[in-house]
Amino acid sequence: MAKDTSPACRQCRREGLKLYLKGERCLTDRCAIDRRPFAPGEHGRRRTKQTEYLTQLREKQKARRYYGLLEKQFRNYYEAANRQTGITGENLLRILETRLDNVVYRLGFAASRRQARQLVMHGHFMVNGKRVDIPSYRVKPDDMVSVEPNSSARGTISEATELTASVSPWLQADHDNLVGKILKYPERDEIDVPVAEQLIVELYSK
């Protein structure tokens, strides 16, 4: 399966804000964007001419990296969102938020989305009592997400819950028993993603 193996900290520096791709490290003074708040590379400190296209592209790249997706995956999600009724940008974020790897992260069962994706792929989580090892699996309201009873990662998952200050309002988490429930589909104001989704729609609409 194809995946982005580029350094996570370089991605944050390129987008100019914390994408929280490294889990606990992002919360410490070792965070790269705190130490070097400029784009990576030889010309990272140079001023770049801002154009409409560049603004839209950066917004798309920011969202893609935030959720850890490749370009083709992200484009497919956009096309799926565009086919739905309602506001395309909000549909897109709702689709991305209901991926199983993102839900595991939002529930506090992983320190980062990368860790959540790895835990899901290794079969450490179940949905409605059935083992699911597909990170892109879409959850629905009333679905129950739980840790596989014999999982060797229960200690790692428990440690991740200690870093979680709060859980998104569209989710319910029991950190003692490592069980979560999807209460409903998230509304736009319940998705705390630093992305202007309308710019992404404008980019793909060209």
Image (cartoon, grey):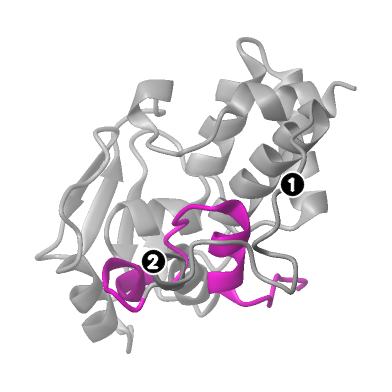
Query: Label 2 amino acid?
Result: Asp
Judge whether residue 128 can be spotted in this image.
no
Highlighted range, magenta? 1-30
Asked which secondary structure carries label 2, the reply is helix
Q: Residue at x 61, y 64 (%)?
A: 11
Report the residue at 56% width, 72% height from top. 8
Q: Nearer the viewer, residue 30 or 144?
A: 30
Other-residue count near label 1 (Cα within 10 Å), few / some / many at <14 / 14–19 / ≥20: few
Q: Is residue 131 left or right of residue 92?
A: left
Q: Please check the rendered image and state whether residue 119 is part of the magenta-colored stretch, yes or no.
A: no
Q: Which mark is residue 101?
A: none
| Quadrant position of the N terminus in the picture | bottom right
Q: Is residue 60 above or below residue 15?
A: above
Quadrant of image for the C terminus? top right
* Residue where numbered disc 1 is placed: 48
Kindly identify the residue that appears in the image at 52 percent across and 31 percent down.
94
* Residue 138 image-quadrant placement: top right
What is the spatial separation of the Cα atoms under label 1 and label 2, in whole angstroms?
21 Å
Sooner in the amino-acid sequence: mark 1 or mark 2: 2
The part of the image, by quadrant, that contains residue 116 is: bottom left
> Please, what secondary structure does the residue beneath circle 1 have?
loop
Q: Residue at label 2?
A: 34
- Front-most of residues 27 and 171: 27
